Amino acid sequence: MLRNREIQIILIILFSITIIGTFVAGFLFSRSAALFVLGISLLLILCMYLFTRWRYKEIEKLSGYLQQISNGDFRLDVRDNYEGELSLLKSNIYKVTKMLSDQGMVLHEDKAKLTDAISDISHQLKTPLTSMAVMADLLYETKLEDEKRREFTRNIQVQLERMEWLVSSLLKLSKIDAGTIFFKKEPVSVPTLIEKALDPLLVPMDIKMQTYSITGEEHTSFVGDFNWTVEALINIIKNCVEHTPEQGHIAISFSENALFTEVIIADNGKGIPKDELPYIFKRFYKGKNASDDSVGIGLAMAHSIITSQKGAIEVTSDLQAGTTFHIKFYKQVI
């Protein structure tokens, strides 16, 4: 501590004042007064020295804490219950440490999620790419029958469309997860929303001879993003269509109250086992009843879109009886 220039300067000043005060007291009063002034002055200098030394040790400890934090150790708790500048500084260091620790955990989780996502994407793309590579090699055969050539070409086209949908969906999910998508807050008419979501699924439903019903008040609405909510409902209804047998039925109903607007989508299909229900909104999760073409991303996207708009989605299901999706959009101020 004595090597510090500022400490040396203050000690020189204090000793100079002490010497001058001692001579003045001895000259004006007496030798006893001079000794008294000298003793008091030296005692004050000693107190100042001990106090300054203690402060420097505390600052040295804080410097050591900061060095540990810079080395990645965020387990420090330097708070105390005393008043003063050092206590305030310790409290602020703890807050920064806590913030860095939380950010480190989030980054670690994001890194793990990214690793898993890359692994899942690689797995999902590997199968169609391998299939396309095999069929492309077969198309080189000069003696290949025209019917087989058309079949392989059609299969390659199907795989390309599947990959395009997968990549597009993953990009949308990534944007939602990153918070780069701005969801509009505008009045959404539920009947119009359902009509728009059903439109691209009418042909698949017609092929399977499925029927549907829509019930609800004409003026039912909520505040949200129309286009993104359409995307969510398409994925949910598509899931119902895929898991409902021929001549099955899909029932859509909606209602509104003072707290939320609810949309219920129910089918009478295969149903989902109870042990799978907690995982159906997990990305790339495929249940036992999933088709071979399923990649397990549609319901994950629907869940992200709905929850990002302060909504909620729940599912109930009974095997061989059907599955019901309950979607709630809570009241928001535009």
Image (cartoon, rainbow, N blue to C red):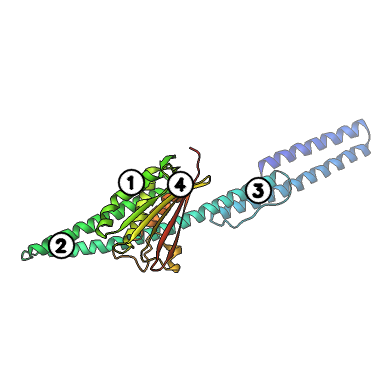
Q: Residues within 10 Å of mark 2 (few under 14, many from 20)?
A: some
Q: Nearer the viewer, mark 3 or mark 1?
A: 1
Mark 4 and mark 3: span between their CA atoms? 37 Å
Mark 2 and mark 4: span between their CA atoms? 43 Å
First in sequence, mark 1 or 2: give its number.
2
Given contact means CB atoms under 8 Å apart, are the residues at marks 2 and 4 in contact? no
Regarding residue 173, the answer to whether it shows in the image is no
Instruction: Answer left or right for 4 relative to 193.
Output: right
Type of amino acid under label 1: Lys
Helix or strand or loop: what does disc 4 sit on?
loop
Regarding residue 257, the answer to whether it shows in the image is yes
First in sequence, mark 1 or 4: give its number.
1
Q: Please name whichever residue, 287 or 26, is drawn nearer the observer in this view of the structure.
A: 287
Query: Where is mark 4, residue-wise?
Result: 309
Type of amino acid under label 4: Gln
Type of amino acid under label 2: Phe
* Residue name at image x 70 percent, y 43 percent: 85
Residue 115 drawn at (x, y percent): 39, 59
Tell me the quarter of the picture where residue 5 sits: top right
* Residue name at image x 83 percent, y 40 percent: 41
Mark 1 and mark 2: span between their CA atoms? 34 Å
* Label of residue 152 in the image: 2
Instruction: Answer left or right for 192 relative to 44.
Output: left
